[in-house]
């Protein structure tokens, strides 16, 4: 699986890093364009390091669980999202699928 901002070699990473430093607004606007369920903010970045005051996507909204879990349910729902290996060899490992995580997140009392 590959995502537009997942770099598999050092030159691609270095080029992305340079762009993120030279054009942070453009870089992060392009990253955010690949998210689902985003309502655009008025401005990608507002910054004033003197005060300090930094705002990203001011006025925008994002449901991060939709990007981490929901959009993967159709194609990856029964695939592992997290494989937890304990430090104690006597303990069993745990595998949580995207569907397991989705159920846990949305059945949480905080939802």
Image (tube, rainbow, N blue to C red):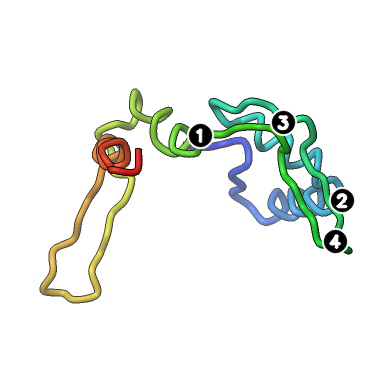
Residue furthest bottom in the image: 88
Q: Where does residue 30 sit, x and y in percent of width and height?
A: 72, 34
Quadrant where the C terminus is found in the figure = top left
Label 1: few (<14), some (14–19) or many (≥20) C-alpha neighbours in 10 Å:
few
**What residue did someone put label 3 on?**
41
Q: Nearer the viewer, residue 50 or 80?
A: 50
Q: Where does residue 85 sit, x and y in percent of width and height?
A: 25, 64
The answer to which of marks 2 and 3 sits earlier in the sequence is: 2
Label 3: few (<14), some (14–19) or many (≥20) C-alpha neighbours in 10 Å:
some
Secondary element under disc 1, as helix, strand or loop, is loop
- Between the C-alphas of marks 2 and 3, the distance is 21 Å
Q: Where does residue 20 sit, x and y in percent of width and height?
A: 78, 50
The answer to which of marks 4 and 3 sits earlier in the sequence is: 3
Q: Judge depth for marks 4 and 2 and give the one in front.
A: 4
- Between the C-alphas of marks 4 and 2, the distance is 16 Å
**What residue did someone put label 1 on?**
63
Secondary element under disc 2, as helix, strand or loop, is helix
Q: Is residue 28 left or right of residue 91?
A: right
| Residue 49 marker | 4
Q: Residue at x 73, y 35 (%)?
A: 29
Answer with the quarter of the image where residue 71 lies. Answer: top left
């Amino acid at each position: 699986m590959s995502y537009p901002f997942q770099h598999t070699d050092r030159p691609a990473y270095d080029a992305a890093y340079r762009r993120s430093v030279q054009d942070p607004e453009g870089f992060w606007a392009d990253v955010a364009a690949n998210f689902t369920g985003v309502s655009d903010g008025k401005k990608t970045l507002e910054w004033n390091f003197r005060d300090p005051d930094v705002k990203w996507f001011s006025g925008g909204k994002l449901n991060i669980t939709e990007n981490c879990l929901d959009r993967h349910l159709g194609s990856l729902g029964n695939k592992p999202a997290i494989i937890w290996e304990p430090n104690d060899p006597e303990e069993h490992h745990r595998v949580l699928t995207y569907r397991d995580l989705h159920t846990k997140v949305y059945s949480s009392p905080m939802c």
